[in-house]
Amino acid sequence: MTKKNHGYSVDPLRIENTDNIVDLLTRTAKSEDSMIVETINNAVEDPANASLIHCTKADPNLFGDDLAFFQYNKVKLAIWNNGNGMTRQTLEEVTNLSKSVGKDQGKNGSFGIGAKISSLKVNESGLMWISCTKGQVHRVLLKKGPEGQYGRVNFVLEDEDGDVAEARVVDITDTINENIKNGSLEDEYFNTEKDYTIIVFCGNDSKQNTVKSPYGQDIADGWMVKELARRYATIPSGAIIKFDKYLRNKNQVEQSLRLS
């Protein structure tokens, strides 16, 4: 005899194998359509609220001695913004999948997946996040591991006293300040008294030039200006996107694009 139903609830499904799901998401992501656009979106929306975005090539002085192992010896695309920076804890949180800091999540909000998944697909050798706030600069490196899983790199580092410890989020404040002092980094962009965040796209190969070949093959000069001008025709933010000369072709005399 069937018992009388007094209502019901739904037990949410759980993901038993997250590596498989992440692999599926990255393989089906359309990086060419969303990597740059999602990255810019994250910069201009809450809680970052950037008013200036600088599309450039990564300064080689950002690659400290602890990154020498990965041999990032080619030009790498970097997107800098002057939005609210992130602390060590926030930077670690925001580099998780399905995690958005300061945003509503769910079907009517942010899923916390777009920029990371679309970027990881074409940056297996490294997707670097650098953020400065309250005088401290921290760095996280996401990449594809030797067994095919995506994740944050755990650096085994030795300090000045010879002590060795593992770190997923690395404090690079001293390195940044030293490079500013000796003129290797521009104070305008790296001053640790200001907030900023930088995303560096290292490609699927450490030797890949991600300014000219962001998706693994060479594409036309000025590709980013065209893409953003087309996609951002109606987005109201008031932010300015600045492009260095090697991200424009000879006919693109404008150095910046205003989102209006």
Image: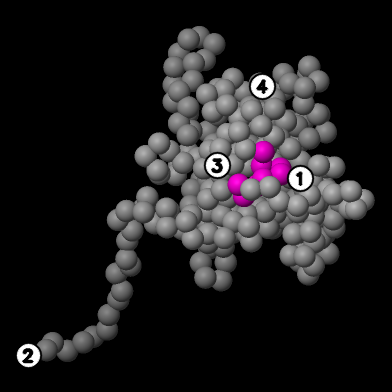
Residue at 50% over, 40% down: 143
User: Label 4, label 3: how many angstroms apart (C-alpha)?
Assistant: 26 Å
- Viewer-side label of 2, 4: 4
The amino acid pointed to by label 3 is Asn
Residue 204 is tagged as 3
Is 215 colored magenta in this rendering? Answer: yes
Secondary-structure class at tag 3: loop
Q: Is there any visible trace of residue 231 in the rendered image?
A: yes
Residue 256 falls inside the magenta stretch? no
Which residue in the protein does label 4 denote?
A: 175
Cβ atoms under marks 4 and 1 closer than 8 Å: no
Amino acid type, mark 2: Met
Q: Residue at x 49, y 48 (%)?
A: 96
Label 1, secondary structure: give it.
Answer: strand
Q: Earlier in the sequence, mark 2 or mark 4?
A: 2
Q: Nearer the viewer, mark 1 or mark 2?
A: 1
Q: Position of residue 142 (x, y in %)?
A: 52, 40
Residue at the extreme right of the image, as rendered:
253
C-alpha distance separating marks 3 and 2: 61 Å
Vertical placement of residue 178 versus 60, above or below: above
In this rendered view, identify the residue nearer to me: 67 or 188. 67
Residue 173, disc: none
Q: Nearer the viewer, mark 3 or mark 2?
A: 3
Q: Residue at x 73, y 21 (%)?
A: 179
Q: Number of labelled discs?
A: 4
- Mark closer to the chain start, 4 or 3: 4
Q: Which residue matches tag 2? A: 1
The span picked out in magenta is: 209-216
> Dot 1 corresponds to which residue?
55
> Between marks 1 and 3, how big is the CA–CA gap?
20 Å
- Sequence-first tag of 1 and 3: 1
Mark in the foreground, 4 or 3: 3
